[in-house]
Amino acid sequence: MTDKKISTEENILEIAREVFIQNGYDGTSMQMIADAAGINKSLLHYYYRSKEKLFGRIFSKVFGQFVPQLGVVFMSDMSIEEKIYAFTEQYIDVFIENPLVPIFVMQELSKNPQHLVGLIREAGINPEIMIESISKALEKEDMQLKDPRHFLVNMIGLCVFPFAARPLTQRMIFNNDEDAYHNFLLERKKEVPEFIINAIKKG
Amino acid sequence: MTDKKISTEENILEIAREVFIQNGYDGTSMQMIADAAGINKSLLHYYYRSKEKLFGRIFSKVFGQFVPQLGVVFMSDMSIEEKIYAFTEQYIDVFIENPLVPIFVMQELSKNPQHLVGLIREAGINPEIMIESISKALEKEDMQLKDPRHFLVNMIGLCVFPFAARPLTQRMIFNNDEDAYHNFLLERKKEVPEFIINAIKKG
DNA sequence: AATCGGTTTAACTAAATGGTTAACCCGAAC
DNA sequence: GTTCGGGTTAACCATTTAGTTAAACCGATT
Protein backbone atom coordinates (compact mmCIF):
# COMPACT_ATOMS: atom_id res chain seq x y z
CA MET A 1 0.00 0.00 0.00
CA THR A 2 1.68 3.22 1.13
CA ASP A 3 4.73 1.12 1.66
CA LYS A 4 6.62 2.46 -1.28
CA LYS A 5 5.47 6.03 -0.73
CA ILE A 6 6.78 6.13 2.79
CA SER A 7 9.87 4.36 1.67
CA THR A 8 10.71 6.92 -0.99
CA GLU A 9 9.87 10.00 1.02
CA GLU A 10 11.72 8.85 4.10
CA ASN A 11 14.54 7.40 2.09
CA ILE A 12 15.15 10.85 0.64
CA LEU A 13 15.38 12.29 4.14
CA GLU A 14 17.89 9.69 5.27
CA ILE A 15 20.06 10.00 2.21
CA ALA A 16 19.87 13.79 2.18
CA ARG A 17 20.89 13.79 5.84
CA GLU A 18 24.05 11.89 5.06
CA VAL A 19 24.94 14.00 2.06
CA PHE A 20 24.30 17.27 3.88
CA ILE A 21 26.24 16.21 6.96
CA GLN A 22 29.14 15.07 4.84
CA ASN A 23 29.32 18.13 2.58
CA GLY A 24 27.49 20.96 4.33
CA TYR A 25 24.70 23.03 2.84
CA ASP A 26 26.85 24.91 0.32
CA GLY A 27 28.80 21.80 -0.60
CA THR A 28 25.67 19.86 -1.45
CA SER A 29 23.63 20.14 -4.64
CA MET A 30 20.16 18.76 -5.23
CA GLN A 31 21.68 16.65 -7.99
CA MET A 32 24.08 15.03 -5.54
CA ILE A 33 21.21 14.06 -3.29
CA ALA A 34 19.13 12.80 -6.18
CA ASP A 35 22.00 10.68 -7.44
CA ALA A 36 22.74 9.31 -3.99
CA ALA A 37 19.07 8.41 -3.55
CA GLY A 38 18.84 6.97 -7.06
CA ILE A 39 15.99 9.23 -8.08
CA ASN A 40 15.23 12.15 -10.32
CA LYS A 41 16.03 15.65 -9.20
CA SER A 42 12.45 16.77 -9.75
CA LEU A 43 11.28 14.27 -7.20
CA LEU A 44 13.18 16.11 -4.53
CA HIS A 45 11.24 19.26 -5.30
CA TYR A 46 8.04 17.26 -5.44
CA TYR A 47 8.42 16.05 -1.85
CA TYR A 48 10.33 18.95 -0.32
CA ARG A 49 9.71 22.08 -2.25
CA SER A 50 13.15 23.60 -2.10
CA LYS A 51 16.71 22.89 -1.03
CA GLU A 52 16.27 25.17 1.95
CA LYS A 53 13.11 23.43 3.11
CA LEU A 54 14.68 20.01 2.77
CA PHE A 55 17.75 21.17 4.63
CA GLY A 56 15.70 22.86 7.31
CA ARG A 57 13.86 19.69 8.21
CA ILE A 58 17.06 17.71 8.42
CA PHE A 59 19.00 20.30 10.32
CA SER A 60 16.51 20.76 13.11
CA LYS A 61 16.60 17.04 13.80
CA VAL A 62 20.39 16.89 13.76
CA PHE A 63 20.55 19.99 15.92
CA GLY A 64 18.50 18.17 18.53
CA GLN A 65 21.13 15.44 18.60
CA PHE A 66 23.89 17.93 19.16
CA VAL A 67 22.38 19.92 21.98
CA PRO A 68 22.09 17.63 24.96
CA GLN A 69 19.11 17.49 27.32
CA LEU A 70 21.22 18.40 30.31
CA GLY A 71 18.27 19.09 32.55
CA VAL A 72 17.27 15.45 32.61
CA VAL A 73 20.62 14.25 33.91
CA PHE A 74 21.33 17.12 36.25
CA MET A 75 17.94 17.18 37.92
CA SER A 76 18.08 13.47 38.73
CA ASP A 77 18.99 12.29 42.21
CA MET A 78 22.44 11.02 41.30
CA SER A 79 25.52 12.43 43.00
CA ILE A 80 27.33 15.04 40.98
CA GLU A 81 30.06 12.56 40.14
CA GLU A 82 27.52 10.09 38.84
CA LYS A 83 25.90 12.86 36.83
CA ILE A 84 29.15 13.77 35.18
CA TYR A 85 29.88 10.15 34.34
CA ALA A 86 26.38 9.60 33.00
CA PHE A 87 26.39 12.69 30.85
CA THR A 88 29.82 12.39 29.29
CA GLU A 89 29.52 8.69 28.53
CA GLN A 90 26.15 9.13 26.93
CA TYR A 91 27.18 12.23 25.01
CA ILE A 92 30.39 10.72 23.68
CA ASP A 93 28.46 7.65 22.59
CA VAL A 94 26.12 9.81 20.53
CA PHE A 95 29.09 11.19 18.62
CA ILE A 96 30.76 7.85 18.16
CA GLU A 97 27.57 6.92 16.31
CA ASN A 98 27.37 10.30 14.52
CA PRO A 99 30.93 11.51 14.25
CA LEU A 100 30.33 14.24 11.68
CA VAL A 101 27.45 15.87 13.52
CA PRO A 102 29.46 18.30 15.69
CA ILE A 103 31.40 19.96 12.92
CA PHE A 104 28.33 20.02 10.71
CA VAL A 105 26.11 21.70 13.27
CA MET A 106 28.73 24.21 14.38
CA GLN A 107 29.57 25.08 10.80
CA GLU A 108 25.98 25.74 9.78
CA LEU A 109 25.16 27.62 12.97
CA SER A 110 28.19 29.78 12.40
CA LYS A 111 26.78 30.74 9.00
CA ASN A 112 23.14 31.11 10.08
CA PRO A 113 22.84 31.92 13.76
CA GLN A 114 19.54 33.75 13.09
CA HIS A 115 17.62 30.49 13.13
CA LEU A 116 18.88 29.56 16.58
CA VAL A 117 15.93 30.99 18.46
CA GLY A 118 13.52 28.83 16.49
CA LEU A 119 15.75 25.78 16.67
CA ILE A 120 16.09 25.95 20.42
CA ARG A 121 12.34 26.28 20.83
CA GLU A 122 11.67 23.39 18.42
CA ALA A 123 14.10 21.18 20.27
CA GLY A 124 12.31 21.89 23.53
CA ILE A 125 15.41 23.15 25.28
CA ASN A 126 15.27 25.57 28.18
CA PRO A 127 18.69 27.13 28.77
CA GLU A 128 17.78 28.74 32.09
CA ILE A 129 16.69 25.44 33.58
CA MET A 130 19.87 23.77 32.31
CA ILE A 131 22.10 26.34 33.94
CA GLU A 132 20.03 26.42 37.09
CA SER A 133 20.08 22.67 37.59
CA ILE A 134 23.83 22.55 37.09
CA SER A 135 24.31 25.45 39.44
CA LYS A 136 22.35 23.71 42.17
CA ALA A 137 24.18 20.45 41.69
CA LEU A 138 27.54 22.20 42.03
CA GLU A 139 26.58 24.16 45.10
CA LYS A 140 24.90 21.27 46.81
CA GLU A 141 28.08 19.25 46.96
CA ASP A 142 30.22 22.30 47.54
CA MET A 143 32.49 22.01 44.55
CA GLN A 144 35.42 24.23 43.74
CA LEU A 145 34.18 25.43 40.36
CA LYS A 146 31.03 27.37 41.16
CA ASP A 147 30.36 29.02 37.81
CA PRO A 148 27.97 26.72 35.93
CA ARG A 149 28.68 28.47 32.65
CA HIS A 150 32.38 27.63 32.60
CA PHE A 151 31.59 24.18 33.92
CA LEU A 152 29.11 23.57 31.12
CA VAL A 153 31.38 24.84 28.35
CA ASN A 154 34.29 22.82 29.74
CA MET A 155 32.31 19.61 29.94
CA ILE A 156 30.77 19.86 26.50
CA GLY A 157 34.00 21.04 24.95
CA LEU A 158 35.92 18.09 26.34
CA CYS A 159 33.36 15.75 24.77
CA VAL A 160 32.90 17.47 21.44
CA PHE A 161 36.36 18.67 20.47
CA PRO A 162 37.96 15.33 19.58
CA PHE A 163 35.18 14.79 17.06
CA ALA A 164 35.20 18.26 15.58
CA ALA A 165 38.97 18.20 15.17
CA ARG A 166 39.21 14.53 14.34
CA PRO A 167 41.11 14.74 11.04
CA LEU A 168 43.80 16.88 12.62
CA THR A 169 44.18 15.02 15.90
CA GLN A 170 43.97 11.59 14.33
CA ARG A 171 46.71 12.55 11.91
CA MET A 172 48.98 14.33 14.36
CA ILE A 173 48.66 12.16 17.43
CA PHE A 174 47.82 8.76 15.97
CA ASN A 175 49.55 8.85 12.62
CA ASN A 176 46.10 8.61 11.02
CA ASP A 177 45.34 5.22 12.52
CA GLU A 178 41.52 4.98 12.49
CA ASP A 179 41.30 2.14 15.00
CA ALA A 180 43.71 3.73 17.42
CA TYR A 181 41.72 6.93 17.34
CA HIS A 182 38.47 5.09 17.85
CA ASN A 183 39.98 3.46 20.86
CA PHE A 184 41.16 6.84 22.09
CA LEU A 185 37.58 8.12 21.86
CA LEU A 186 36.35 5.17 23.89
CA GLU A 187 38.98 5.83 26.55
CA ARG A 188 37.63 9.33 26.88
CA LYS A 189 34.41 8.01 28.36
CA LYS A 190 36.51 7.42 31.48
CA GLU A 191 39.21 10.05 31.06
CA VAL A 192 36.89 13.01 30.62
CA PRO A 193 34.71 12.50 33.70
CA GLU A 194 37.77 11.75 35.82
CA PHE A 195 39.44 14.87 34.53
CA ILE A 196 36.41 17.02 35.30
CA ILE A 197 35.81 15.58 38.75
CA ASN A 198 39.42 16.08 39.74
CA ALA A 199 39.27 19.62 38.48
CA ILE A 200 36.25 20.67 40.49
CA LYS A 201 36.74 18.70 43.70
CA LYS A 202 37.81 20.64 46.73
CA GLY A 203 41.42 19.73 47.31
CA MET B 1 56.78 52.23 -7.87
CA THR B 2 55.69 48.67 -7.12
CA ASP B 3 53.62 50.19 -4.38
CA LYS B 4 50.31 49.67 -6.09
CA LYS B 5 51.24 46.26 -7.41
CA ILE B 6 51.99 44.96 -3.95
CA SER B 7 48.97 46.73 -2.64
CA THR B 8 46.58 45.09 -5.10
CA GLU B 9 48.06 41.63 -4.93
CA GLU B 10 48.27 41.58 -1.16
CA ASN B 11 44.97 43.33 -0.76
CA ILE B 12 43.34 40.47 -2.65
CA LEU B 13 44.88 37.99 -0.24
CA GLU B 14 43.65 39.86 2.82
CA ILE B 15 40.14 40.35 1.49
CA ALA B 16 39.91 36.79 0.20
CA ARG B 17 41.03 35.54 3.59
CA GLU B 18 38.15 37.30 5.28
CA VAL B 19 35.58 36.16 2.74
CA PHE B 20 36.78 32.54 2.80
CA ILE B 21 36.90 32.42 6.59
CA GLN B 22 33.45 33.91 6.83
CA ASN B 23 31.78 31.70 4.22
CA GLY B 24 33.96 28.64 3.72
CA TYR B 25 35.31 27.39 0.41
CA ASP B 26 31.98 26.22 -0.99
CA GLY B 27 30.14 29.26 0.28
CA THR B 28 32.52 31.65 -1.45
CA SER B 29 32.50 32.58 -5.13
CA MET B 30 35.24 34.38 -7.00
CA GLN B 31 32.68 37.09 -7.71
CA MET B 32 32.14 37.65 -4.00
CA ILE B 33 35.85 38.12 -3.46
CA ALA B 34 36.17 40.41 -6.46
CA ASP B 35 33.28 42.56 -5.24
CA ALA B 36 34.65 42.71 -1.72
CA ALA B 37 38.04 43.76 -3.07
CA GLY B 38 36.51 46.23 -5.49
CA ILE B 39 38.13 44.65 -8.54
CA ASN B 40 37.26 42.65 -11.60
CA LYS B 41 36.85 38.91 -11.35
CA SER B 42 39.43 38.36 -14.07
CA LEU B 43 42.04 40.02 -11.93
CA LEU B 44 41.71 37.27 -9.37
CA HIS B 45 42.61 34.72 -12.01
CA TYR B 46 45.42 36.93 -13.21
CA TYR B 47 47.16 36.92 -9.83
CA TYR B 48 46.09 33.52 -8.50
CA ARG B 49 45.27 31.22 -11.34
CA SER B 50 42.31 29.43 -9.82
CA LYS B 51 39.97 29.46 -6.87
CA GLU B 52 41.71 26.41 -5.45
CA LYS B 53 45.17 27.97 -5.71
CA LEU B 54 43.99 31.18 -4.06
CA PHE B 55 42.29 29.22 -1.33
CA GLY B 56 45.28 26.98 -0.84
CA ARG B 57 47.63 29.87 -0.15
CA ILE B 58 45.23 31.39 2.34
CA PHE B 59 44.37 28.15 4.06
CA SER B 60 47.91 27.08 4.77
CA LYS B 61 48.57 30.38 6.51
CA VAL B 62 45.39 30.20 8.56
CA PHE B 63 46.13 26.58 9.38
CA GLY B 64 49.40 27.67 10.88
CA GLN B 65 47.52 29.99 13.21
CA PHE B 66 45.25 27.22 14.34
CA VAL B 67 47.85 24.60 15.14
CA PRO B 68 49.90 25.85 18.04
CA GLN B 69 53.66 25.56 18.35
CA LEU B 70 53.43 23.56 21.52
CA GLY B 71 57.03 22.48 21.45
CA VAL B 72 58.28 26.00 22.12
CA VAL B 73 56.28 26.42 25.29
CA PHE B 74 56.67 22.92 26.63
CA MET B 75 60.40 22.66 26.10
CA SER B 76 61.06 25.90 27.96
CA ASP B 77 62.28 25.84 31.56
CA MET B 78 59.02 27.01 33.07
CA SER B 79 57.22 24.87 35.63
CA ILE B 80 54.37 22.86 34.21
CA GLU B 81 51.87 25.21 35.78
CA GLU B 82 53.53 28.18 34.16
CA LYS B 83 53.54 26.34 30.87
CA ILE B 84 49.82 25.69 31.03
CA TYR B 85 49.10 29.29 31.88
CA ALA B 86 51.38 30.56 29.13
CA PHE B 87 49.95 28.31 26.48
CA THR B 88 46.24 28.76 27.19
CA GLU B 89 46.44 32.53 27.59
CA GLN B 90 48.35 32.93 24.40
CA TYR B 91 46.18 30.49 22.47
CA ILE B 92 42.90 32.03 23.62
CA ASP B 93 44.22 35.47 22.68
CA VAL B 94 44.88 34.28 19.14
CA PHE B 95 41.24 33.28 18.80
CA ILE B 96 39.91 36.43 20.38
CA GLU B 97 41.67 38.17 17.50
CA ASN B 98 40.56 35.56 14.95
CA PRO B 99 37.31 34.17 16.27
CA LEU B 100 36.19 32.43 13.10
CA VAL B 101 39.44 30.58 12.48
CA PRO B 102 38.68 27.43 14.50
CA ILE B 103 35.40 26.55 12.87
CA PHE B 104 36.79 27.46 9.45
CA VAL B 105 39.86 25.28 9.76
CA MET B 106 38.06 22.30 11.26
CA GLN B 107 35.34 22.51 8.64
CA GLU B 108 37.72 22.55 5.71
CA LEU B 109 39.94 19.86 7.19
CA SER B 110 36.89 17.71 7.69
CA LYS B 111 36.15 17.99 3.98
CA ASN B 112 39.74 17.64 2.75
CA PRO B 113 41.90 15.75 5.20
CA GLN B 114 44.12 14.54 2.35
CA HIS B 115 46.08 17.78 2.36
CA LEU B 116 46.95 17.47 6.02
CA VAL B 117 50.30 15.81 5.48
CA GLY B 118 51.47 18.68 3.33
CA LEU B 119 49.99 21.31 5.61
CA ILE B 120 51.71 19.94 8.69
CA ARG B 121 55.03 19.87 6.88
CA GLU B 122 54.57 23.41 5.53
CA ALA B 123 53.72 24.71 8.98
CA GLY B 124 56.91 23.19 10.35
CA ILE B 125 55.14 21.17 12.99
CA ASN B 126 56.57 18.01 14.45
CA PRO B 127 53.90 16.03 16.25
CA GLU B 128 56.29 13.57 17.85
CA ILE B 129 58.32 16.32 19.48
CA MET B 130 55.14 18.01 20.70
CA ILE B 131 53.90 14.83 22.36
CA GLU B 132 57.33 13.98 23.71
CA SER B 133 57.90 17.37 25.31
CA ILE B 134 54.49 17.28 26.96
CA SER B 135 55.08 13.78 28.17
CA LYS B 136 58.37 14.75 29.78
CA ALA B 137 56.87 17.83 31.39
CA LEU B 138 54.08 15.75 32.92
CA GLU B 139 56.37 13.02 34.20
CA LYS B 140 58.96 15.40 35.52
CA GLU B 141 56.55 16.96 37.99
CA ASP B 142 54.81 13.68 38.67
CA MET B 143 51.34 14.68 37.59
CA GLN B 144 48.24 12.57 37.87
CA LEU B 145 47.32 12.58 34.18
CA LYS B 146 50.21 10.80 32.50
CA ASP B 147 48.81 10.33 29.00
CA PRO B 148 50.03 13.31 26.97
CA ARG B 149 47.50 12.61 24.25
CA HIS B 150 44.46 13.08 26.43
CA PHE B 151 46.13 16.01 28.12
CA LEU B 152 46.78 17.68 24.78
CA VAL B 153 43.28 17.14 23.45
CA ASN B 154 41.76 18.35 26.70
CA MET B 155 43.83 21.50 26.82
CA ILE B 156 43.25 22.46 23.20
CA GLY B 157 39.58 21.52 23.34
CA LEU B 158 39.01 23.72 26.37
CA CYS B 159 40.53 26.66 24.52
CA VAL B 160 38.96 26.09 21.11
CA PHE B 161 35.44 24.93 21.84
CA PRO B 162 33.92 28.23 23.04
CA PHE B 163 34.96 29.78 19.74
CA ALA B 164 33.80 26.96 17.51
CA ALA B 165 30.42 26.78 19.23
CA ARG B 166 30.13 30.50 19.85
CA PRO B 167 26.73 31.16 18.23
CA LEU B 168 25.15 28.39 20.24
CA THR B 169 26.76 29.08 23.60
CA GLN B 170 26.41 32.83 23.32
CA ARG B 171 22.72 32.43 22.57
CA MET B 172 21.98 29.76 25.17
CA ILE B 173 24.09 30.91 28.08
CA PHE B 174 24.32 34.65 27.54
CA ASN B 175 21.05 35.45 25.81
CA ASN B 176 23.11 36.50 22.80
CA ASP B 177 24.88 39.30 24.61
CA GLU B 178 28.09 39.90 22.62
CA ASP B 179 29.89 41.83 25.33
CA ALA B 180 29.01 39.35 28.05
CA TYR B 181 30.34 36.54 25.91
CA HIS B 182 33.52 38.41 25.13
CA ASN B 183 34.02 38.90 28.82
CA PHE B 184 33.39 35.19 29.36
CA LEU B 185 36.13 34.39 26.87
CA LEU B 186 38.54 36.67 28.71
CA GLU B 187 37.71 34.96 31.99
CA ARG B 188 38.68 31.67 30.45
CA LYS B 189 42.31 32.76 30.29
CA LYS B 190 42.28 32.16 34.04
CA GLU B 191 39.53 29.56 34.34
CA VAL B 192 40.98 27.11 31.83
CA PRO B 193 44.50 26.84 33.23
CA GLU B 194 43.16 26.62 36.80
CA PHE B 195 40.76 23.89 35.69
CA ILE B 196 43.52 21.92 34.01
CA ILE B 197 46.00 22.26 36.83
CA ASN B 198 43.46 21.14 39.40
CA ALA B 199 42.59 18.19 37.22
CA ILE B 200 46.10 16.86 36.86
CA LYS B 201 47.61 17.69 40.23
CA LYS B 202 48.15 14.82 42.61
CA GLY B 203 45.47 15.24 45.28
C1' DA C 1 56.50 60.30 -29.77
C1' DA C 2 56.72 55.30 -30.09
C1' DT C 3 56.73 51.13 -27.52
C1' DC C 4 57.13 47.96 -24.03
C1' DG C 5 55.53 45.46 -19.73
C1' DG C 6 52.75 44.71 -16.27
C1' DT C 7 47.90 45.72 -14.86
C1' DT C 8 42.93 45.91 -15.50
C1' DT C 9 38.73 45.36 -17.85
C1' DA C 10 34.56 43.82 -20.75
C1' DA C 11 32.81 40.17 -23.12
C1' DC C 12 32.54 35.66 -23.52
C1' DT C 13 32.19 30.24 -22.78
C1' DA C 14 30.82 25.85 -20.99
C1' DA C 15 29.15 23.66 -17.20
C1' DA C 16 26.40 23.41 -13.09
C1' DT C 17 22.99 25.38 -10.18
C1' DG C 18 17.98 25.50 -8.12
C1' DG C 19 13.70 25.26 -9.79
C1' DT C 20 9.48 24.61 -13.18
C1' DT C 21 6.50 22.40 -16.52
C1' DA C 22 4.13 19.08 -18.86
C1' DA C 23 3.81 14.69 -19.81
C1' DC C 24 3.69 9.85 -18.45
C1' DC C 25 3.15 5.77 -15.60
C1' DC C 26 0.34 2.73 -12.94
C1' DG C 27 -2.62 0.83 -9.45
C1' DA C 28 -7.20 1.74 -7.45
C1' DA C 29 -12.02 3.25 -7.80
C1' DC C 30 -15.82 3.58 -10.61
C1' DG D 1 -12.20 -0.16 -19.58
C1' DT D 2 -12.01 4.49 -18.26
C1' DT D 3 -10.70 7.91 -15.32
C1' DC D 4 -8.54 9.63 -11.41
C1' DG D 5 -4.52 10.88 -8.48
C1' DG D 6 -0.31 10.43 -6.55
C1' DG D 7 4.47 9.18 -8.02
C1' DT D 8 8.03 9.82 -11.43
C1' DT D 9 10.42 11.45 -15.30
C1' DA D 10 12.64 14.18 -19.26
C1' DA D 11 13.11 18.47 -21.04
C1' DC D 12 13.58 22.88 -20.15
C1' DC D 13 14.68 27.84 -17.98
C1' DA D 14 17.16 31.58 -15.93
C1' DT D 15 20.99 32.39 -13.18
C1' DT D 16 25.42 31.66 -11.42
C1' DT D 17 29.63 29.31 -11.52
C1' DA D 18 34.91 29.10 -12.56
C1' DG D 19 37.65 30.20 -16.00
C1' DT D 20 39.37 32.34 -20.85
C1' DT D 21 40.47 35.78 -24.29
C1' DA D 22 41.55 39.79 -26.40
C1' DA D 23 41.69 44.32 -26.05
C1' DA D 24 42.68 48.59 -23.51
C1' DC D 25 45.12 51.26 -20.13
C1' DC D 26 49.21 53.53 -18.26
C1' DG D 27 53.60 54.67 -16.43
C1' DA D 28 58.47 53.98 -17.55
C1' DT D 29 62.18 53.35 -21.16
C1' DT D 30 63.94 54.44 -25.43
Image (tube, coloured by chain):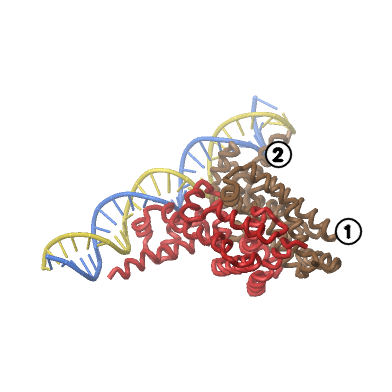
Chain colours: A brown, B red, C yellow, D blue
Seen at 73% across and 48% down, the residue is A93
Q: On the picture, is D17 further left or further right than A25?
A: left
Q: On the picture, is A48 further left or further right than D28?
A: right
Identify the mark nearer the N-term, 2 or 1: 2
Q: Identify the residue position indicated by label 2 in the image.
A: A6
Residue A175, x across and y down, in percent: 57, 46
Residue A131, x across and y down, in percent: 77, 66
Q: Which of A111 and C15 is in front in this view?
A: A111
Seen as rendered, the residue at the extreme right is A77
**Chain to which mark 2 belongs:** A
- Visible residue check, residue B60: yes
Name which residue type carries label 1: Asp
Q: Distance between the residues labelled 2 and 1?
A: 42 Å
**Secondary structure under badge 1?**
loop
Q: Which of marks 2 and 1 is in front?
A: 1
**Is residue A6 shown above or below B14?**
above
Seen at 58% across and 59% down, the residue is B103
Q: Which of B150 and A121 is in front in this view?
A: B150
Residue B168, x across and y down, in percent: 67, 62
Q: Identify the residue position indicated by label 1 in the image.
A: A77
Q: Quadrant of the C terminus of chain A?
A: bottom right
Do discs 2 and 1 share a chain? yes
Residue A193, x across and y down, in percent: 76, 56
Name which residue type carries label 2: Ile
**Secondary structure under badge 2?**
helix
Seen at 69% across and 34% down, the residue is A4
- Visible residue check, residue A24: no
**Chain to which mark 1 belongs:** A
> Badge 2: how crowded within 10 Å, few (<14), some, or many (20+)?
few
The mark total stands at 2
Q: Quadrant of the N terminus of chain A?
A: top right
Q: Write down the quadrant of residue B57 in the picture.
A: bottom left
